[in-house]
Amino acid sequence: MSFWPHLFTRSKSGFILVLGGGGGRGLAHIGVLDALEEYGLRPDILVGSSVGSLVATMYAQQPEPKLLKERTLNFLNSKSFHRLTLPVFNHLREMPIESWLERLSAVARQSVLYGRAVTSNAIADKDVLFQLLQELGVSGSFSKLHIPVQMVSTIFPQGGMAVFSSGDLNTSLAASMAIPTIFPPVNIAGQRYVDGGVYADIPVLHAQNIASKRQCVVAVNAGSRRLGMHDPVNVLGMLDWVVDAQSQQLRERDFLHADVLIEPDIHSRLWYDFSHPEKVIHTGYQAMMLKMPALLKLLGA
């Protein structure tokens, strides 16, 4: 092996952390942040897409992973989460189903969904997203964050990527998390946006574009599932499979541009599964620890 590449390789002085989408799988991001904290490592910039934008923002508000974990678990175990109001699902409140996520699955079997599907572009109202952010204590503007955050959204209906890094946090987060068919597009200054994962589930290329020569890019893939592992068992599972199949090649292309790629072993979980959150968080922690030597080497630590 030639020593020349190593002769001209310089250590990086910092890193940009990219947190991708994935719904409930995105809980693994918290474990990644916890592992980084153990080594005294804090990202210079956080880049997020979909649920990755939410975790990035909550962390940037108060950069203490253990508090982030506590905050998240308290919310997931609260009545607020399990009884989160979904206006289109109001008729299901009399059913013996506690979780709003279970209602989401159950409603697919109800005739009301078909009526909504042909008269609207989403089965839930965007107010649910803002309600979720309020319950999590997210508010204010980007300027109040302790770590810069850039969140990715998809321009609707033209396509293309939009990046939010200033202004109102909640509106930008809603735009980054508005899953098509589930939530309607979010309007900001006359332009509509949907979930960032449609265009860039893990926006590694954007992170590389904004990185300085002294920064490396660390990306967390908590969203994509390995195709062929499981057959979809319902409508939501089939939608999950379609999205993964369509975007697999694009994700693999993006992965090539990450200096360090973290892949928690949670890909058998469906995106709307928020059960056993501590297990998912710990899986993220383990995945980051596995790649910690590679990151420390890049940082010259």
Image: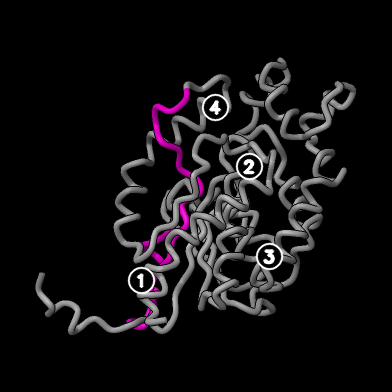
Specify whether 79 is left or right of 30.
Answer: right
Find numbered disc 4 in the image and state the secondary structure of the residue it sits on: helix
> Is residue 192 a member of the stretch shown in magenta?
no
Residue under pointer 4: 237
Find numbered disc 3 in the image and state the secondary structure of the residue it sits on: helix
The mark nearer the N terminus, 4 or 2, is 2
Residue under pointer 2: 184
Mark 4 packing: few (<14 Cα in 10 Å), some, or many (20+)?
A: some
Mark 1 packing: few (<14 Cα in 10 Å), some, or many (20+)?
A: few
* Front of the two marks 2 and 1: 1
Find numbered disc 2 in the image and state the secondary structure of the residue it sits on: loop
> Is residue 224 a member of the stretch shown in magenta?
yes
Is any part of residue 191 visible from this angle? no
For badge 3, the amino acid type reads Met
The mark nearer the N terminus, 2 or 3, is 3
For badge 4, the amino acid type reads Gly
Which residue is painted at 53% across and 76% down in the image?
41
Residue under pointer 3: 58
State the separation of the CA atoms marked 2 and 1. 30 Å
Which residue is painted at 34% across and 66% down in the image?
259
| Viewer-proximal residue among 62 and 301 | 301
For badge 1, the amino acid type reads Asn
* Front of the two marks 1 and 3: 3
Rendered-image quadrant of the C terminus: bottom left
Where is residue 30? Give x, y as percent: 62, 59
State the separation of the CA atoms marked 4 and 2. 20 Å
Mark 3 packing: few (<14 Cα in 10 Å), some, or many (20+)?
A: many
Where is residue 163? Give x, y as percent: 50, 64
Mark 4 vs 2: CB contact within 8 A: no
Looking at the rendering, the stretch of residues picked out in magenta corresponds to 201-230
State the separation of the CA atoms marked 4 and 3. 28 Å
